[in-house]
């Protein structure tokens, strides 16, 4: 079994110490193999905020880390830095690769940097990025769970969030669905949900889901959603198995921070039959 922990929008500079400690306990409990940081790691892209983020990530003791920047991770007020070296602090702390790839027996995870120095909050996926990801998806092995990670969402559930949808996402969804993508992970809007893209976008050639994460650690929570993280499991002994007679399977769990108990609790579990004809089974935890 492979377990992936998705942490999004921690916004270091606005982090909550009690939630940080609860997430450390959850990480020790679940012992995930992979950590995905899906952007807005910091509040204002400052060196001290990136240092704090790196120290926290190291304290989780997770073997594999994939990190992409969000719009808050490039300077806002330092215009020269924003134009000339927007990712300097991110690269110093998390490495030069802004679009890391993980290719294992169970998982293919492809990260896409959708930030642009000339955009304030909006994200954008270019034609070249869509093609690059599609080619890597097409080369995936049969048993792998195929995940693409962006910061901005490729789809939303509420009209007021439409302005936050990733520019170029419709073409990307078409291409990546055709190439074999299963899940597109995102953040940005601090609202967790799982959305069947094949039920919303006409003509998609195969099943594909958007998996959105809330803010993991920040005080910048929405009134309808507190702090939360996602846990994705695939492979043998995951509660499902990677390949069955009905097709490949995986689970996506949402873990919410409980203010009363100062701990993360599993609130929802999505059990996906990725290649079969049945819709995913969604049940309370």
Image (cartoon, rainbow, N blue to C red):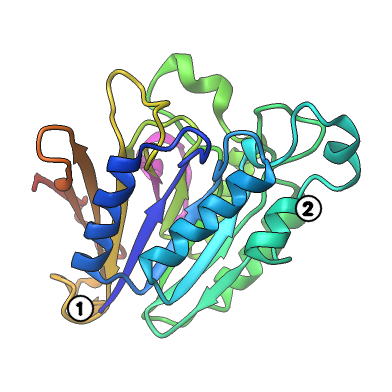
Element carrying mark 2: helix
At a point 8% along the width and 48% down the height, the residue shown is 285
The circle drawn on residue 244 is 1
At a point 13% along the width and 70% down the height, the residue shown is 239
Q: Which residues are magenta?
A: 195-211
Where's residue 73, x and y in %? 65, 42
Question: Is the N terminus in the top left, top right, bottom left or bottom right quadrant?
Answer: bottom left
Where's residue 211, x and y in %? 38, 46
Between 12 and 208, the one lying in front of the other is 12
Q: Which residue is mark 2?
A: 88
Q: Is residue 220 visible?
A: yes
Mark 1 vs mark 2: give the one in front.
Answer: 2
In this rendering, the answer to whether 222 lies above or below 6 is: above
Element carrying mark 1: strand
The magenta stretch spans residue 167: no
The magenta stretch spans residue 210: yes
Where's residue 24, x and y in %? 29, 58
- Name, please, the residue furthest toward the top: 160
Can you tell which quarter of the image residue 98 is in? bottom right
At a point 28% along the width and 27% down the height, the residue shown is 225
Can you tell which quarter of the image residue 232 is in? bottom left
- Name, please, the residue furthest toward the bottom: 105
Is 65 on the left or on the right of 208, as rendered?
right
Alpha carbon distance from label 1 to label 2: 45 Å
In this rendering, the answer to whether 110 lies above or below 52 is: below
Q: Residues within 10 Å of mark 1 (few under 14, many from 20)?
A: few
Q: How many numbered callouts?
A: 2
The mark nearer the N terminus, 1 or 2, is 2
Between 191 and 61, the one lying in front of the other is 61
Q: Is residue 149 visible?
A: no
């Amino acid at each position: 079994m492979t377990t992936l922990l998705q942490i999004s929008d921690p916004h270091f500079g606005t982090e909550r110490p009690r939630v940080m400690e609860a997430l450390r306990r959850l990480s020790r409990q679940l012992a995930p193999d992979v950590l995905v940081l899906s952007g807005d790691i910091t509040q204002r892209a400052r060196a001290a905020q990136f240092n704090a983020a790196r120290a926290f990530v190291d304290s989780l003791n997770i073997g594999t880390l994939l990190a992409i920047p969000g719009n808050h991770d490039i300077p806002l007020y330092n215009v020269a830095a924003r134009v000339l070296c927007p990712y300097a602090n991110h690269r110093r702390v998390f490495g030069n690769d802004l679009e890391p790839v993980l290719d294992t027996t169970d998982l293919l995870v492809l990260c896409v940097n959708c930030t642009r120095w000339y955009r304030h909050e909006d994200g954008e996926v270019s034609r070249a990025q869509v093609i690059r990801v599609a080619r890597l998806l097409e080369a995936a092995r049969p048993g792998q769970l195929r995940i693409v990670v962006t910061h901005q969402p490729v789809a939303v559930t509420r009209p007021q969030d439409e302005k936050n949808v990733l520019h170029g996402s419709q073409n990307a969804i078409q291409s990546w669905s055709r190439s074999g993508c299963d899940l597109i992970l995102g953040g940005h809007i601090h609202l967790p949900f799982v959305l069947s893209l094949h039920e919303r976008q006409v003509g998609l050639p195969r099943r594909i889901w958007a998996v959105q994460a809330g803010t993991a650690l920040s005080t910048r929570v929405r009134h309808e959603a507190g702090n939360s993280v996602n846990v994705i499991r695939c492979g043998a002994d995951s509660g499902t198995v990677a390949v069955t007679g009905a097709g490949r399977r995986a689970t996506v769990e949402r873990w919410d921070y409980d203010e009363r108990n100062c701990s993360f609790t599993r609130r929802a579990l999505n059990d996906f039959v990725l290649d079969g004809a049945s819709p995913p089974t969604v049940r309370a935890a």
